[in-house]
Image: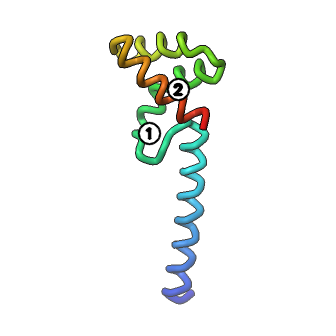
Amino acid sequence: MSNETEFIDLRTRISRLEAQIEALYQHLGLSLGDDPSQADEDGPVIDVLRTGNLLEAIKVYRQIHNVSLVEAKSAVENLNARIIR
């Protein structure tokens, strides 16, 4: 296999991996600029949001992140907007 062929093959594989990663981010309700470790912490919040219970999601967010009601409400609303897309 020539260097050029290898290079094209690697670029193709990278493109496929990038597409898979993007699909995973979308499935988790994240954008590529988000911190993936945040998705792990917010998993329970996302689960509650998917049931449609915004108030419970805010409560869960506050318990996980130890933030004020205002901060939690804003964060959960932003998270919800990304999930609903």
> Which secondary structure lies at badge 1?
helix
Mark 1 in CB contact with mark 2 (< 8 angstroms): no
Answer with left or right where residue 66 lies relative to residue 20.
Answer: left
Give the residue drawn at x 60%, y 14%. 53
Question: Is residue 52 positioned above or below 7 on the image?
Answer: above
> Which secondary structure lies at badge 2?
helix
Question: Is residue 65 positioned above or below 20 on the image?
Answer: above
Give the residue drawn at x 52%, y 65%. 14
Which one is in front, 3 or 8?
A: 8
- The image shows residue 78 at horizontal and vertical percentages of 47, 29
Question: Is residue 12 positioned above or below 46 on the image?
Answer: below
From the image, tell me which residue sits under label 1. 36
* Quadrant occupied by the N terminus: bottom right
Q: Residues within 10 Å of mark 1 (few under 14, many from 20)?
A: some
Which residue occupies the extreme right position in the image? 51
Residue type, numbered disc 2: Gly
- Picture colour scheme: rainbow
Question: Is residue 32 positioned above or below 83 on the image?
Answer: below
Give the residue drawn at x 47%, y 33%. 39
The span from disc 1 to disc 2 (Cα, nearest Å) is: 11 Å
- Number of marks drawn: 2
Give the residue drawn at x 41%, y 46%. 33
- The image shows residue 76 at horizontal and vertical percentages of 47, 23
- The image shows residue 55 at horizontal and vertical percentages of 53, 11
* Corner quadrant of residue 72: top left
Residue type, numbered disc 1: Pro
Q: Residues within 10 Å of mark 2 (few under 14, many from 20)?
A: some
From the image, tell me which residue sits under label 2. 43
- The image shows residue 48 at horizontal and vertical percentages of 59, 18
